Image: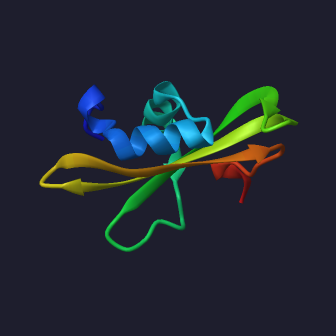
Amino acid sequence: MPSITAEHFHSHIRRRMEQRGITEEEVRKTLREGWDAPDAKPGSEGRTLVFTYDAVWEGTHYEEKEVTVYFKLEDEQLVLLTPIARYGNNFPREDSS
């Protein structure tokens, strides 16, 4: 995985991160440590990671946050497509199949 710089976080990505409660560090960690997201569209890839959350999001308390980052590699350059967050608890992990 190529290293991630501030330039990777273009305005569209930053808006989606803000709307969905995702930090830059969560994106970076998901790309570094996450497992393959099985629902990535053809021509793209995704990585998923579950974080301990133990906080309130939009008025409801959640124990965990699952972050999925979709991206593609163009000429060995990383292009972030979109980040997704789901809030809840007991999310499946990569090794729980």
Q: In the visual, does 82 lie left or right of 56?
A: left
Of 56 and 33, the residue lying toward us: 56
**Furthest-bottom residue in view?**
42
Quarter in which the C terminus is drawn: bottom right
Q: Is residue 46 visible?
A: yes
Q: Is residue 5 visible?
A: no
From the top left corner, tell me how far across and down residue 14 is, in percent: 42, 37
For the point 47% across and 65% down, which residue is it?
Answer: 40
Q: In the visual, does 7 lie left or right of 65?
A: left
From the top left corner, tell me how far across and down residue 57 is, in percent: 77, 35
Of 87 and 2, the residue lying toward us: 87
Q: Is residue 39 above or below residue 60?
A: below
For the point 75% across and 29% down, which residue is it?
Answer: 53
**Furthest-left residue in view?**
75
Q: Is residue 32 above or below residue 54?
A: below
- Colouring scheme, one of rainbow, by chain, secondary structure, one colour: rainbow
Of 89 and 11, the residue lying toward us: 11
Q: Is residue 12 above or below residue 37?
A: above
From the top left corner, tell me how far across and down residue 26 is, in percent: 53, 31
From the top left corner, tell me how far across and down residue 86 is, in percent: 69, 49
Q: How many marks?
A: 0
For the point 25% across and 46% down, which residue is it?
Answer: 78
Q: In the visual, does 50 lie left or right of 5?
A: right
Quarter in which the N terminus is drawn: top left
